Image: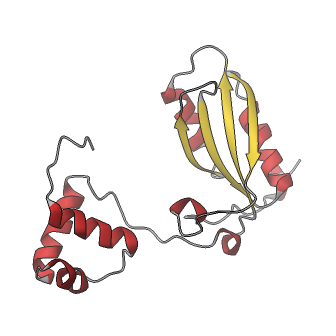
Amino acid sequence: MNSGETSFDELDRKIITALMANARTSFAEIGMSVGLSATAVKRRVDRLRDTGVITGFTATVQPSALGWRTEAYVEVYCEGAAPPRRLAEVVRNHPEITAAMTVTGGADALLHVRARDVEHFEEVLERIRVEPFIRKTISVMVLSHLLPESPEAGATQPAPTVDAANVR
């Protein structure tokens, strides 16, 4: 969504803020805090979803509970100019990559990777590096989250199970 496409007012902002803090907050509770009926809040939320302002609702879970015990950020450096479209194809093939973006600076992309353990992380890195247009990677392991309540600190999917046929 382009921020210029859809206009929303201060009440919409308050509703969005409440949902971002806790997506399970009822429309009635939100309505009481912003001065609207539950029905009016629902209509606004439906409109915000229809226009793409609200893109979804998820549960954020303690990563270790889902099998993710290792976390890192990986800078990716490409040969020549790798188009973002091609980078997106590559990262979609790795369930361990939880976020990916093109960036300014020396690196072409930055990947957020979660793995079961260091050995699993190394295997993921090897799979990423076999792409012919990837020149090098630089990894930074996460030791702790300074803002543990941030979305980046949580996980949205479980770690993949170990497939004995694919273990090297």
Q: Could you say which quadrant of the image residue 8 lies in?
A: bottom left
Q: Looking at the picture, does residue 88 appear above or below residue 57?
A: above
Residue 96 lies, in percent from the top left, at 66, 52
Residue 23 lies, in percent from the top left, at 36, 74
Q: Looking at the picture, does residue 137 appear above or below residue 61?
A: above
Name which residue lies at 20% across and 86% down. 28
- Residue 19 in the figure: left or right of residue 64: left
- Residue 34 in the figure: left or right of residue 142: left
Front position in the image: 119 or 167: 119
Front position in the image: 65 or 20: 20
Residue lying farthest top? 80
Residue lying farthest front? 146
Colour scheme: secondary structure
Name which residue lies at 33% across and 57% down. 55
What is the number of callouts on the image? 0
Q: Name the quadrant of the N terminus.
A: top left
Residue 93 lies, in percent from the top left, at 61, 43
Q: Looking at the picture, does residue 68 appear above or below residue 118?
A: below
- Residue 40 in the figure: left or right of residue 156: left
Residue 3 lies, in percent from the top left, at 24, 43
Residue lying farthest right? 168
Name which residue lies at 59% across and 27% down. 108
- Residue 5 in the figure: left or right of residue 116: left
Front position in the image: 81 or 11: 11
Q: Looking at the picture, does residue 107 appear above or below residue 99?
A: above
